[in-house]
């Protein structure tokens, strides 16, 4: 087993975003995907990104406001978002205090039309939040 410790990963700045790519672990040729962690500081946004790879992200800390295909979707900690090949995206952290921390994997679409896989009707981001009744 390999253990990957985010705290001690080597990282570098892409705009305001701190990026720790998994290339540093020498896994090339062993996995069918690349991976990275990244942190978007409070009240800031990632640079616009667009690439042929499909991108699957898990929000680990904070809430991501994911801008893609003309919409902004709030993705809470523990939830995930999947971006199509060539789907431009900007990741906003609208919180004033909490950094947004994300784990992302990305890979070239597997045959077929990678874009079509993700461009089905968007899964509603609305989550029923139980309402606490005040005593
Ligand atoms: Ni990207």
Image (cartoon, grey):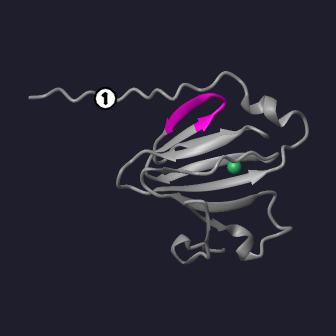
Residue that appears at 58% across and 28% down: 71
Magenta region, mostly helix, strand or loop? strand
Residue farthest to the right, as pictured: 111
Q: Residues within 10 Å of mark 1 (few under 14, many from 20)?
A: few
State the extent of the magenta-drawn residues as a range.
Answer: 67-74
Q: Is residue 86 magenta?
A: no
Foreground pick, 14 / 113: 14
Horizontal and vertical percent position of residue 17: 57, 60
Residue farthest to the left, as pictured: 135
Horizontal and vertical percent position of residue 69: 67, 30
Mark count? 1
Horizontal and vertical percent position of residue 43: 43, 50
**To which quarter of the image does residue 98 belong?**
bottom left
**To which quarter of the image does residue 99 belong?**
bottom left
Q: Is residue 71 magenta?
A: yes
Foreground pick, 79 / 66: 66
- In the picture, the quarter occupied by the N terminus is bottom right
Horizontal and vertical percent position of residue 67: 59, 37
Residue that appears at 81% across and 57% down: 32
Foreground pick, 52 / 81: 52
């Amino acid at each position: 087993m390999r253990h990957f410790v985010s705290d001690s990963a080597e990282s570098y700045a892409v705009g305001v975003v701190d990026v720790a790519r998994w290339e540093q672990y020498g896994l090339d040729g062993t996995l069918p995907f690349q991976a990275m962690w990244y942190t978007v500081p409070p009240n800031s946004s990632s640079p616009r990104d667009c690439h042929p790879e499909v991108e699957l992200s898990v929000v680990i800390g904070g809430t991501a406001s994911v801008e893609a295909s003309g919409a902004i979707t709030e993705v809470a900690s523990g939830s995930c978002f999947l971006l199509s090949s060539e789907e431009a995206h900007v990741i906003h952290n609208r919180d004033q205090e909490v950094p947004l921390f994300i784990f992302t994997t990305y890979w070239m679409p597997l045959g077929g039309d990678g874009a079509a896989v993700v461009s089905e009707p968007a899964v509603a981001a609305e989550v029923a939040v139980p309402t606490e009744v005040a005593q």
